[in-house]
């Protein structure tokens, strides 16, 4: 990993954008990175896009705000329209092709997250599909490390969701062509 990874995650409210960001930040922290999760709340996101930023760094993090992301994880078209111009020229765009028509852009990776999640039996794990795909592209830590954090967030009262979340992580990872 380079010394600094800046990630913007965006989608509709309810798509698990905030959880995806929290899992990335907590897993990074557990693996020894300095990690920061910065949610965006406010009236402009109500009924529209929800977003957060995550910074993972081997060194100190000087600011929670950045103008260009190294990676965009985009769950819907309005979020793509809003954040597309905030991606570094050599950055990675990971987008949910279930809700965004495919388009040509260098370093763009379509992931049919909703379709994959529905095949697994629960559309609400599309965010974990995207997390698995991200980890295939940027192997900052193992899927099992991220899954341990997911389990912690879900807690024992949602133990029945552990298996499908792990399956979603793996499916996203495998969609990109990663190896466990």
Image: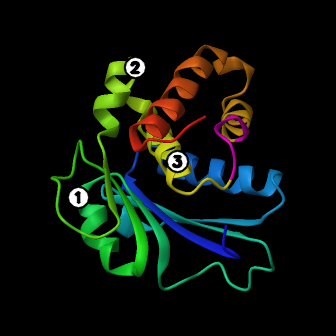
Q: Which residue is mark 2?
A: 120
Position of residue 23 measured from the top left corner of the image (x, y, whole percent): 64, 47
Q: Could you tell me which residue is drawn at 48 percent across and 75 percent down?
A: 69
SS for dot 3:
helix
Q: Nearer the viewer, residue 175 or 101?
A: 175
Residue stretch rendered in magenta on the structure:
141-145
Crowding at mark 3 (Cα within 10 Å: few <14, some 14-19, many 20+) = many
Which quadrant of the figure contains the N terminus? bottom right
Q: Which residue is mark 3?
A: 136
Asked whether, in this view, residue 102 is left or right of residue 142, the answer is: left
| Location of residue 176 by image quarter | top left
Q: Could you tell me which residue is drawn at 56 percent across and 49 percent down?
A: 135
- Mark whose residue sits in front, 3 or 1: 3
Q: Which residue is mark 1?
A: 77
Which quadrant of the figure contains the C terminus? top right
Position of residue 129 measured from the top left corner of the image (x, y, whole percent): 45, 38
């Amino acid at each position: 990993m380079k010394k600094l990874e800046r990630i913007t995650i965006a989608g509709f409210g309810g798509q698990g954008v905030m959880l995806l960001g929290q899992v990335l930040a907590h897993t990074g922290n557990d693996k020894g990175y300095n990690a920061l999760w910065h949610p965006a709340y406010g009236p402009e996101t109500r009924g529209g896009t929800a977003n957060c930023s995550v910074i993972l760094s081997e060194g100190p993090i000087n600011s929670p705000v950045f103008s260009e992301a190294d990676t965009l994880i985009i769950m819907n078209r309005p979020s793509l329209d809003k954040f597309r111009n905030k991606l570094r020229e050599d950055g990675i765009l990971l987008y949910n092709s279930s809700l965004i028509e495919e388009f040509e852009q260098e370093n763009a990776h379509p992931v049919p997250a909703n379709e994959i999640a529905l095949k697994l039996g629960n559309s609400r794990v599309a965010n974990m599909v995207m997390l698995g795909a991200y980890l295939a592209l940027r192997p900052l830590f193992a899927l099992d490390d991220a899954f341990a954090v997911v389990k912690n967030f879900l807690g024992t009262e949602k133990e029945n969701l552990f298996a499908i979340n792990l399956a979603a992580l793996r499916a996203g990872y495998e969609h990109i062509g990663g190896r466990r």
